[in-house]
Amino acid sequence: MADTHTLQPQEPTKLKKPDWIRVKAPVSEGYKSTRDLMREKKLHTVCEEAACPNIGECWSQGHATVMILGDTCTRACAFCNVKTGVPGMVDADEPRHLAEAIGKLQLKHVVITSVDRDDLEDGGAAHFAKCIEYLRMTAPSTTVEILTPDFQKKDGSIEIVTRARPDVFNHNIETVPRLYRTIRPGARYFHSLYLLQRVKELDPSIFTKSGLMVGLGETKEEVVQVMDDLRAADVDFITIGQYLQPTPQHAPIDRYVHPDEFEYYYRVAKTKGFLMVAASPLTRSSYHAGDDFAKMRANRDALLADKRA
């Protein structure tokens, strides 16, 4: 007699989080002070919106990555925890509020990012430029790093932001080209490379930076190829960190990458000529960004001195 039992679909095996990826819950007074200031100035942060694992450490030190142009993204990338939908109106007072908050925190280095705003004619480029201009006026000693969307199909937007002269222009490549269709469907790999290269063409004095996640199903060879592509675009700084699945609805983790493999990526990237490399399980684009910027600038100065000698 035939077996009448039907096979039930199996739940995907949940990977156990290794010890090297665990972080402490945020409880410090410094964390609370930074959180309260962000609320007071009505500012969003990618630290909260993207559920960054380093929020406790960074906020306890008064470091935060401010997310401008609202908290709603027009895209739905499979890795990102920022909510998607129809964004609201742009807050014209946001650049002033941002500058006031940075003044209170007395930061040496600030990172400004945003949601994708495909609904805006310039993708939010002019708003980025205004934020940089306000910061230059109110906190002239603070160095400014921006982490922008790709400004795809927004002619002139890269130029608008570059003319505002941020100290660091960051745009994340995120993953290897083979995985773009499933992980970053609204973006194009070679357009992101073009953006980074275009910034250098417009103003070679601006440091460029990009990052990618591992643990999504990529191979070592593909990661190394991304390094080569970024160096071909004259990118100065690369960050490589472990992908962490924000919710069950997001792309699953393929594997937890061992710290030894991150060390391998670090060594390979250094040999390819990046001025600065950050590669570890908890590395994120803006994690230790101020310290890394200082090191990157020192590395460039030393390299220029060697060339003159």
Image: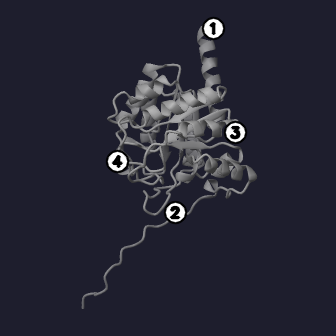
Cα–Cα span, label 2 and label 4:
25 Å
Which residue: 61% across, 45% down?
Answer: 41
* Secondary structure state at the residue bearing disc 3: helix
Q: Which is nearer the eye, 190 or 258? A: 190
User: Which of pointers 4 and 3 indicates the residue nearer the eye?
Assistant: 3
Q: Quadrant of the N terminus?
A: bottom left
Q: Earlier in the sequence, mark 3 or mark 2?
A: 2
Q: Real-space Cα distance between discs 3 and 1?
A: 43 Å
Numbered circle sitting on residue 309: 1
Q: Residues within 10 Å of mark 4 (few under 14, many from 20)?
A: few
Name the residue carrying label 3.
Answer: 104
Give the Cα distance between marks 1 and 2: 53 Å
Query: Mark 4 or mark 3: which comes first in sequence?
Result: 3
Q: Which residue is mark 4?
A: 185
Count neighbours of disc 3 (C-alpha within 10 A) and say few if under 14, some if 14 to 19, many if 20 or more.
Answer: few
Q: Give amino acid for label 3.
A: Lys
The reply to whether the C-beta atoms of the residues labelled 3 and 2 are less than 8 Å apart is: no
Secondary structure state at the residue bearing disc 4: loop
Left or right side of 167 for 107: right
The answer to which quarter of the image holds residue 116 is top left
Q: Secondary structure at mark 2?
A: loop
**Disc 4 to disc 3, C-alpha distance:** 39 Å
Q: Which mark is nearer the camera, 3 or 1?
A: 3
Q: Is residue 97 above or below residue 12?
A: above
Q: Is residue 222 left or right of residue 283?
A: left
Q: What is the distance, in whole Å, between disc 3 and disc 2 at their CAs? A: 42 Å
Give the spatial CA distance, label 4 vs label 1. 48 Å
| Amino acid of disc 2 | Leu
